[in-house]
Amino acid sequence: MASASAEQLAHPMDNIPVRNLRFDTETLRGESALWSHSKPDFSMFINALGIHVPYFERFLVAVFREVRADIGDADLMGDVKGIIGQEAHHAFNFVGWNEVMSARYPRVSELEADAAQHFANMSTKRSRFFQVGYVAGYETFTFLAGAIILDRYEELMGDADPVMRALWVWHQVEEVEHGAVAFDVYKYFYAEREWARKFFVLLAFAHITKETLRAYLHMGRVEGFWHQSVRGFKAADFFVRFAADLARSALPVLKRDYHPRNHPICNENQNKAALAWRQRYDAGLTTLAIEQGDLTCALEGKAGGSRQ
Ligand SMILES: [Fe+2]
Ligand SMILES: [Fe+2]
């Protein structure tokens, strides 16, 4: 441990910087939306998942802007400011990508409208307790998906469109960085309602899965996958396995003494792709397009391989 660098010792949730990035996803208009050549099914999965995500992110921003006036802890206030900034930039970029995707997939606008309505109902018809709980439940999975995808970076995005790869690495890095904030806000206000915290985790998982499946089925239909038994099976298999991985990774979340910082997926040995991405950003190199090898080469010789 004595030879480990300071950044290897740091916890990925130690800092929540707001990075104002704008990705030029227009370059993919008219191209295939299956931007990962390593794993096309992953790009369809994450495209499907991402349709409703900006509407959740805007909901999170609205809820946290509302509750922050009642937070008396300066550290937590700082974290809330960080997550609001990060999520606002996420939402902007994802709405842009949805618009590009809608040229390929005719039901994207309808799926977006449903998502906007769902979170509008949450805003007007649910209590503050329910809103904070729902946000915490959702953020459980954005954090876990972030860590899972970064751990499988080479397999899922090793050969991919540089802009879309850059967008998703940026998003996943930041989801891990602010992965404890919604949990801490829930605990700050409702620490005694532990049973409800678990209920919201399950509720959010059900909603994320439902929304992603609807979009995935539509996209698979447009791509013609469901008429080809082998291709269709492969795509269905990817969905089921990824959803199962996500569900399995959430099991520690249901423990009474859980905290995101202590989740086994997020320990003191930081993900190498995330570290390399931060190094690029801090060095002033572009993070708006990530070329093949940009992240894997950066840390070669230091630790290599996936996180243990
Ligand atoms: Fe986000
Ligand atoms: Fe988030």
Image: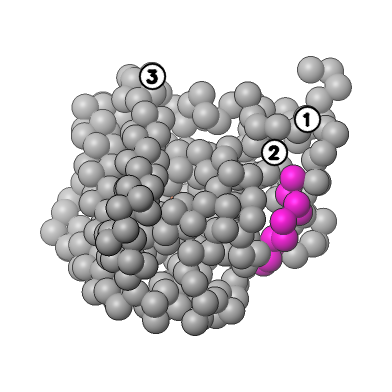
Q: Name the residue under label 2.
A: 272
Label 2 Cα neighbours within 10 Å, binned few <14 / some 14-19 / many ≥20 = many
The vertical placement of 213 against 221, above or below, is: above
Residue shown at 80% from the left, 61% from the top: 284
Element assignment for label 2: helix
Residue shown at 30% from the left, 78% from the top: 106
Disc 2 + disc 3, Cβ < 8 Å? no
Q: Name the residue under label 3.
A: 257
Comes first in the chain, label 2 or label 3: 3
Q: Is 9 placed left or right of 42 in the picture?
A: right
Disc 1 + disc 2, Cβ < 8 Å? yes
Q: Which mark is residue 169?
A: none
Label 3 Cα neighbours within 10 Å, binned few <14 / some 14-19 / many ≥20 = few
Element assignment for label 1: loop
Viewer-side label of 2, 3? 2
In this rendering, does residue 237 appear at all?
Answer: yes
> Looking at the figure, which quarter contains the N terminus?
top right
Q: Is 112 placed left or right of 71 in the picture?
A: left
**Can you tell me whether the CB of the residue at mark 2 lies under 8 Å from the nearest atom of ligand 1?**
no
Using the rendered view, name the quadrant where residue 257 is placed: top left
Q: Give the range drawn in magenta.
A: 287-296
Label 1 Cα neighbours within 10 Å, binned few <14 / some 14-19 / many ≥20 = few
- Residue 233 position in % (x across, y down): 32, 48
Q: Name the residue under label 1.
A: 303
Nearest to the observer: residue 300 or residue 6: 300
Q: Does the magenta stretch include residue 66?
A: no
Rounded to the nearest angstrom, the CA distance separating label 2 from label 3 is: 28 Å
